[in-house]
Image: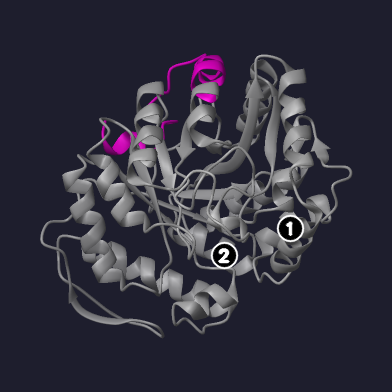
Amino acid sequence: MKQELATSDAVTSAPVVHWFLPTSGDGRDVGDSARSGLSGPPAREATIDYLAQIARAADQLGFAGALTPTGTWCEDAWIVSAALARETQSLKFLVAMRPGIVSPTLTAQMAATLQRVSGGRVAINLVAGGDDAEQRRFGDWLDHDQRYARTAEFLTVLRGAWSPDPFDFTGEHYQVADARVMLPPDPPPPIYFGGASAVAEEVAARHADVYLAWGEPTEMLAERLERMRLLAERHERRLRFGLRLHVITRDTAAEAWAETERMLANMDDLAVKLAQRRLKRTGSVGQQRQNELHGGSKDNLVIGPNLWAGFGLMRGFGGTALVGSHAEVAERIREYGELGFHEFILSGYPHLEAAYQVGEGLLPLLRTAAPTASARSPMALATA
């Protein structure tokens, strides 16, 4: 069998927890970011010094890695990750990027270089793109399904260029001859990939190491995970599963829910309306599912045990948060783990203070068992 990952579906060890680098700005409220679409600068600019504070905190607190996002309103993920690799010791960088905007062979070279200079601390989060306007801003006019077909070819060429032998490929979107890099990365960076549409799931089943989803109630995610397991098995592969969530975790549940009320009170109704108008134009099936969780209303935002959809009123690309005491949030994460999720990419506002809240209050509760070789993240295995 073409078994690319020796993993177990059962999670019997501590989950692998990553943090988030707010490269579009930060602050105490969801609107404190260029990504929110509001006018004016964020409360905290995404300077390299501020991002370095967050990265060093995540490193010292024991987070496995940090997601460096991509998009118009973000600083470039490759450059930021390279700069912060010099500021940290063991923190890994999950570099988000859009295939089709950069050639797969050049990406293979960039990733191989960063893997070497960082000491093996790189993974790649491929984002096929769900916003047509943003894609066209970068010169990409393919429709939704074509973007995912191109992503599959992109990954074929990327892995081929990392192989020991020169790689030739002719497809609908790419044609390369003698693709290679100076030195193949050792080990190759793992590929993280998400998408809720049928075409996205097929690409993930064939090519991804870790399939990512946004936070939803467990009953909504259970069917997707089972479908993804079966799809991967058809291709003689096994996937790991990761979940992207915000968190508001405090010593007591009352403190955590009070923070949601404060944040909600600071969400201007007109700003919410404008954000929802923009988010409803998305072609992303995953974003459409997120929109349905709150319906654009400030009412009924608690959509599951300790699961709050309020972030989605102002921002896209994942708008749910686990809210509660450290013990309650840990229990919800364990429940997602029992469902099959191995890794969690968390974030909170502001990201510096929230890193300490999560790192000091939540992470110790999740470290109830040492990870085994079969259940550890591909990023952890890469540097073991």
The mark closer to the camera, 1 or 2, is 1
Identity of the residue drawn at 64% across and 56% down? 316
Describe residue 135's horizontal placement relative to residue 108 as left or right.
Answer: right
Of residues 259 and 283, the one drawn nearer to the viewer in this rendering: 259
- Label 2: element kind: helix
- Stretch of the chain drawn in magenta: 358-384
- The amino acid marked with disc number 1 is Ala
Q: How crowded is mark 1: few (under 14 residues within 10 Å), some or many (20 or more)?
A: some
Left or right of residue 24: residue 94: left
Residue annotated with mark 1: 271
Residue at image mark 2 = 200
- Between disc 1 and disc 2, whose residue precedes? 2
Q: Residues within 10 Å of mark 2 (few under 14, many from 20)?
A: many
The residue type indicated by label 2 comes to Ala
Mark 1 lies on a secondary structure that is helix
- Residue 137 in the image: state x and y as whole percent: 49, 78
Q: Name the residue rendered at 34%, 34% in the picture.
A: 380
Residue drawn 39% across the image and 44% down it? 5
- Is residue 47 visible in the rendered image? The answer is yes
